[in-house]
Amino acid sequence: MSDEEYNSDCSIASDYGLLKKALPFDTRIPANFDPNKVPQTAEEFLQYACYERSLMKPWTTAKIDPAKLHSIEVREFKEDVLNNTVAPHLLPTQQWQKDKLDEFIEFREYIQSKMEITSKDVLREIDFKERIVKTSPEYEEVMKFSQADKIRALELINDYLDTMDYGTCFGDHVGSWIYSMLSLLDTPLISDDCHVVRTLAKKCIEIRSNYKETDIKKFFPLNLFICIISKFFGQLDLSDP
């Protein structure tokens, strides 16, 4: 396209749409126009804008030196490889997952309606890891947790799961804490919080893969949290078939 054709097209397009003139103004640059002078009036400013536009090309291209591309650092991100081997009869059925997810959503909606709004963190971290093993969460306490408290509690639970003996699973008290925190979490999650929840699901998958039990009932808590996190919190790549 020649400059004349480009200017002609712009002239036609200026009568329509976004290019239509908002104010009547003569776009011709005056003979006495000085591009080095700082515009003092609105008219001079528009004249300067027209002058700058006249210097622009209809399009520009970039000259790339292929030799310089070899010096650019390339980072490789590898996908997580999880040990997710478990006997098929120990995996949850689709119906079981649907039923448990419906139960979780119903409980979550109920508990969320009773939550107290708090702006102060109240989680006691000092003895938390001991508490989750020995006692279940107290309603009056966890209902006052801020979002930061809930995420921090899940982080501490993740730390505890790392200390478990190979081939074992967590007890009922720990399971109650996990279920409570997932029920109380505000959504949507920010990326950092989502990472904590996703890490919990991955740890459950690892524990399940190494669990030495053969009774499917022993796998229910692990299957449950993998189901909730993958399907409710959108980590579908971690979900069971």
Image (cartoon, rainbow, N blue to C red):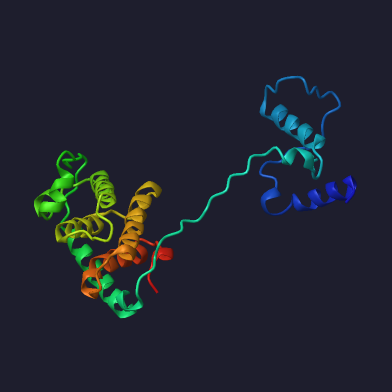
Rendered view: 87 above or below 28: below
Could you tell me how many numbered marks the image carries?
0
Q: Is residue 124 left or right of residue 30?
A: left
Residue 78: % across, % down? 52, 53
**Relative to the observer, which residue lies in front, 83 or 99?**
83
Q: Is residue 214 left or right of residue 209?
A: left
**Relative to the observer, which residue lies in front, 232 or 177?**
177
Which residue corresponds to the image point at 13% horizontal and 48% vertical from the top-left? 131
Q: Is residue 148 left or right of residue 129?
A: right
Residue 143, visible in the rendered structure: no
Image quadrant occupied by the C terminus: bottom left
Which residue corresponds to the image point at 20% horizontal and 40% vertical from the top-left? 121
Residue 92: % across, % down? 31, 75
Farthest residue toward the top?
A: 37
- Picture quadrant where residue 46 is located: top right
Residue 163: % across, % down? 26, 49
- Picture quadrant where residue 215 is located: bottom left
**Relative to the observer, which residue lies in front, 133 or 23?**
133
**Relative to the observer, which residue lies in front, 24 or 106?**
106
Residue 234, visible in the rendered structure: yes
Residue 114: % across, % down? 15, 57
